[in-house]
Image (spheres, rainbow, N blue to C red):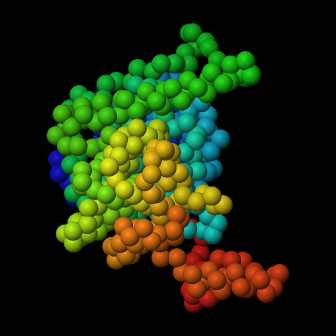
Amino acid sequence: MLKQCEGSHAVAATVALCRPEVICAYPISPQTHIVEGLSEMVRDGTLQGCEFINVESEFAAMSVAIGASATGARSYTATASQGLLFMAEAVWNASGLGLPIVMTLANRAIGAPINIWNDHTDAMSMRDAGWLQLFAENNQEAADLHIQAFRLAEEISLPIMVCMDGFILTHAYEQVDIPTQEQVDAYLPPYEPRQVLDPREPVSIGAMVGPEAFTEVRYLAHARQMQALDLIPQLATEFRQQFGRDSGGLIRTYCTDDAVTIVVALGSVLGTIKDTVDDLREAGHKIGVLGITSFRPFPTNAIRHATRNAHRVVVVEKCFAVGVGGIVSRDVRTAMRDRPQRLYGVVAGLGGRAITKSSLHGLLLKAMDDELEQLTFLDLDWNAVNRELERERQTRRSGPIAENLLRDLGVVAAGAV
């Protein structure tokens, strides 16, 4: 059923159709509307057979999800930013125990300084925690990926984060096709766990493991993610056959068949990049787009194949590793190993800064002329940066960086959120 609705409400409605049995969450912007919507459905009886558990923190939310999943309940939660960091220990435990929890991550920058707007730093902080990570380009895909996520998580018994850009998607109103209960039931079978805590057959999970077996345990977690590289495209094909639309998969390509320049990105920025590429192609430039849906497991072979004929690859990413550079671009570089192609990493949109067509247009023209640096920060205010560096050179007690920058720009710092 086509419905004009907020992205968070579309996700809540779709998660409810997946028949979760335990939902536990602690509200944090911009995730709050998702769990509010689900709590209302549990309260009014729209979502039956489900217990909604209010918890005192994000750490508790993931801990409850772990306990519920371990007893054989289909479990769901959602978080963002600092909330994901607060549950970090339990995030690693969930994957280490092989529990198929599904979690929506409403991507938001990590402080300090405090910032509630979108980038991908939170997801990247947990990229090695053993969870699968699927990134949505739009609200339709955000909803669809949750249906596939429950099926995928339960097939391989690993947890999954469905990442959707905070505010840009969570709070945007778009037309979304909400499936029927019958459609979802036909695609997503009842949960049959691989492991269950049952008092009638007592076992231990999460026991102490020493050097004699720990490497094997970690390798098997890796092996399951490698299994997902085959399973994700299969489930996307089944989804298309069942629901009549393409959604999910490992990667999505756009105008790449003849492209000598390919732009790689994750999430909602792909829409703006595609619009920019359309303009550039009208001007005669052979340029295309490769969107990564599955960041973990990383689709190395699929990316290697999709970029095989390109002369250069430009990775636009909303995150970076301080002291190193781009995170996504490093993985893409691994996929392009032993090739003469040029690769440029572009950090953009940090803390919610707008990524505009005009900025992308100028950037991509420079890339096609091979005039970019290996690492570029899109729309970085070098005057502001250099003023602060000079201030630090002049005095030891130069003060807090963030407040200095805001003062230079004539901006009053916002209160904590």
| Residue occupying the point 53% across, 51% down | 330
Q: Is residue 67 visible?
A: no
Percent from the top left, x then y, of residue 81? 55, 56
Percent from the top left, x then y, of residue 163? 43, 50
Closer-to-camera residue (68/377): 377
Q: Is residue 100 left or right of residue 190?
A: right
| Residue occupying the point 17% across, 51% down | 2
Closer-to-camera residue (42/106): 106
Percent from the top left, x then y, of residue 45? 33, 40
Q: Residue furthest top?
A: 201
| Residue occupying the point 58% across, 26% down | 219
Q: Is residue 17 visible?
A: yes
Q: Is residue 253 left or right of residue 413?
A: left
Q: Look at the picture and state if 144 lies above or below 368.
A: above
Percent from the top left, x then y, of residue 379? 47, 76
Closer-to-camera residue (368/82): 368
| Residue occupying the point 35% across, 46% down | 308
Q: Is residue 212 left or right of residue 131?
A: right
